[in-house]
Amino acid sequence: MITENRENGLIHLVSGEISFLVRTFEKKLPEVIYWGKPINIDGMGKGSNFNLDFLNPPMPIAVLDQPISNSILPTRSYAYRGHQGIRGSRSGLDFAAKFEFSNSKINSEDDSISFEFEDKIAKLRLNTVITLVEAALISITHKVTNIGVDSYQLDELSTTLPIPYRASEILDFTGTWCKEKYPQKHTLTFGKHMRESRRGRTGHDASPLIIAGTPGFKNRTGEVWGAHLGWSGDHFSYVEKFSDGHQNLGCGELLESGEIILSKNESYETPPSYYVYSSVGLDGISKQFHSYLRNLNQGRNKPRPVIYNSWESVYFDIDESHLRKLALVAKSIGVERFVIDDGWFKGRRNALSGLGDWEVDLNVFPNGLKPLIDFVNSEGMEFGLWVEPEMINIDSDLYRAHPDWLLRANQDRLPFGGRGGQQTVDLSNPDAFNHIFNQLDTLLSKHNIAFMKWDMNRDLIDPGHNGKPAIHTQTLAVYRLYEQLRKNHPKVEFENCSSGGGRVDIGIAKRTDRAWASDTNDPLERSSIQRWTSLLLPLEMLGNDVSTAESHTTGRTHDFAFRASVAIFGHLGIQFDLMKLSEIELTQLKDLISFYRNNRELMHSGIYVNADVDIDSEFLHGVVSPKKDKALFSYVKEKNSANEYPPRVRFPELDSNLTYKVSVIGGVFKAKRSEIQDLGELKDPKWMHNLAESIPGSVLTEIGLHMPILSPEQSILIAFDKN
């Protein structure tokens, strides 16, 4: 809901979870004066002499004659000392933009406010749109237009919002391949904490969010404010604190010098920035993003089928006869979608050749892909295929025919290679774009392909088009490629993969159906990776495979129960050479798949929660149904602790007014116990021996239950059903 008080220029976006107060002025840019818990402002603005000057600070000695403006677009012209919201010039002139208010419009139907401003001297127009897209999630975009005759070089246009001084701790993320989204938390001091990504993609080490919160904020406690840029190219985010009382949270696209040059009447619009607030810790942030993405995907949401992926089974050693045998076994254990990974296309016998030639390799499939696809379909499974459309190998027909189609700063200099020398196709080039699109469009038109695993395996180095910086246009071209393929093939689902989780953001999530969170299937690593990736993405968008006991990426070994209990919280996939498994192992997989299929509606529509556990060696997470009549939790012990007794853990989001039947899921999820347990010297907590009893929801949410003593890297699954 939006209310406006023209008497004092106050606009209030309000929901049940947030108030967002904007103060407008007759000339200068408006300010966001509050963003947080819902507040009642009925008394503000009443009376002819009432104004909002009481919000102005005192005036110390040796300062400017008026308070520093912390506007929705901070600029030096309004004396803002921190990160500037706009930077640019006309060959050094008109560098100090000073926008003045021109017009505003409120659209109550979509809870948005739009503003228009002009700098009549610098000849620039600014349009800003602020939208309440979820109960506590704000989207902001700026658009700048050159209304002058001479061209204007834009070096930055970014968004920012104020946050209070009590938000004194920062959470952001680092990481690398197979260890994505590793959290780091620290205290905010005076100055700027800035994170920048110059990878040409979001980055394994990039924050899905940058978060500032009250001291000690956790999963379920504390006030937190977060910012996320819905963009898949270069980007930055920051938190900034000043002695003048200002503290801001901001993000934007990271532009190269000369990348955006606006001719007369040309515009640049920022990617949408998402600002989120929660008074109940990090889970409150997840709830907003999950709801937003689920609403965006309405019409494409359907039960997420169990996927078999060939990669860790055969790698590049693809043989049609073997694939048919794998398909038969996959069908027998309940797989619903059979996916051929890398190696199916022309000249692709290793990672050094073939990228760019998206035609079936007739040496591997003499009669093409259709016979295999027909066979898979006849067994009742969908068929999927791996592609990497943005990349090109030097050893490829495409490069030999069009060496000028590479994304590079200079035609005489080859950028550093990646993954054995692969380069990037310049999708800013219309001919290159059309060639790649036509290849993929033909592939999808001629074959019954239900799923496309879209990979992107390298950072972009020296990314140029016709000698000019081109990350911006390359990112937009990737979006356009997705959009045109989705338009032509609306039933095909697309997975976003980028060496695992190297491109996870809302920009790409809007155009895909799921993300491959990491190339590691090690469940210990995956537990952390999925937890922090799920800060942004709901579980149904998290591709999550169970694979061999010994991880191909870490060499660690885990029993099936632990691997299965981690894989279940996401969109389940299988990566085994099924021909080498015993009957016992195949039965385990069949039971896991059956459990997933019976519970995926809960997992993919429920509220994902993370409990606050009092010791750092253990964690508890789960999914609670929207009606709170069902839930599934996983208690995980990562390592040994100094605690003699495991502490009680509380189960968030259950209904305190209901009673629940509690059960420990056995079968393939039964945790491996020590020999001491087998000797009867280790006793489980009493509640595990009285599973037929009902437990009040208030006990589960407020008092909690002791967990059993587990060995490190073990977990148990606990189900709750309304009694």
Image (cartoon, rainbow, N blue to C red):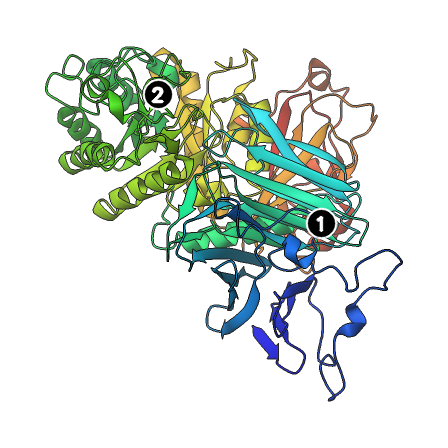
Residue 708 x/y as whole percent: 72, 30
Mark 1: amino acid? Arg
Query: Where's residue 403, x and y in %?
Result: 25, 20
Left or right of 117? Residue 411 is: left
Q: Disc 2 or 1, which lies upstream in sequence? A: 1
Cα distance, mark 2 to mark 1?
A: 41 Å
- Give the residue type that dot 2 points to: Gln
How many marks do you count on the picture?
Answer: 2
- Write the residue at 43% across / 57% down: 145
Q: Residue 414 location in percent, x, y?
A: 36, 17
Q: Which residue is mark 2?
A: 423
The quadrant in which the N terminus is found is: bottom right
> In screen coordinates, is 113 left or right of 576?
right
The crowding category of the residue bearing disc 2, from other C-alpha atoms within 10 Å (few below 14, some 14 to 19, many at least 20), is many
Nearer to us in this view, 126 or 304: 126
Q: Which mark is residue 81?
A: 1
